[in-house]
Image (cartoon, helix red, strand yellow):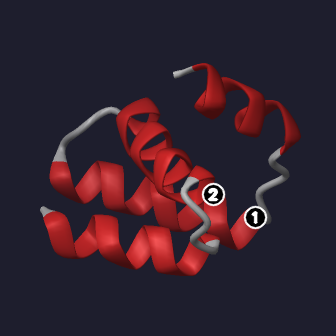
Amino acid sequence: MSNVRSFRSQSDYSQEQVTKMIDFADEQHIPLFDVMKRVEKLMCEGMTFDEAFNQEVGAD
């Protein structure tokens, strides 16, 4: 998890990206933090935000 924390400290989300995550969390009735954590974990593995978010949306 330290990888995710170090990435989070460097990440700057655009307003559009934040809105996507908020909308998805709201639609799925899950905490925003959980969505962010899973997306950031995928981003630490080398995915872009869009790739990670699309994979997360497809996962649920």
Residue at the farthest left position: 60
- What crowding class fits label 2: few (fewer than 14 Cα within 10 Å), some (14-19), or many (20 or more)? some
46 with respect to 22 (left or right): right
Q: Which mark is residue 59?
A: none
Label 2: element kind: helix
Q: Residue at x 63, y 57 (%)?
A: 18
Proximity of marks 1 and 2: CB atoms separated by less than 8 Å: yes
Can you give x and y, in whole percent of width and height, for residue 5 in the image?
A: 67, 25
Q: Which residue is mark 1?
A: 15
In this rendering, the answer to whether 44 lies above or below 49 is above
Q: Which mark is residue 18?
A: 2
Label 1: element kind: helix
In this rendering, the answer to whether 25 lies above or below 34 is below
In this rendered view, identify the residue nearer to me: 50 or 46: 46
Q: Quadrant of the C terminus?
A: bottom left
Report, in whole angstroms, how far the alpha carbon at label 1 lies from the one at label 2: 5 Å
In this rendering, the answer to whether 37 lies above or below 53 is above
Q: Amino acid at mark 2?
A: Val
Can you give x and y, in whole percent of width and height, for residue 59 in the image?
A: 16, 66
24 with respect to 39 (left or right): left
Q: How many marks?
A: 2
Q: Quadrant of residue 33?
A: top left
Can you give x and y, in whole percent of width and height, for residue 58 in the image?
A: 20, 76
Q: Amino acid at mark 1?
A: Gln
In this rendering, the answer to whether 32 lies above or below 6 is below
Q: Residue at x 75, y 64 (%)?
A: 15
Q: Residue at x 55, y 48 (%)?
A: 40
- What crowding class fits label 1: few (fewer than 14 Cα within 10 Å), some (14-19), or many (20 or more)? few
Q: Residue at x 55, y 79 (%)?
A: 50
26 with respect to 1 (left or right): left
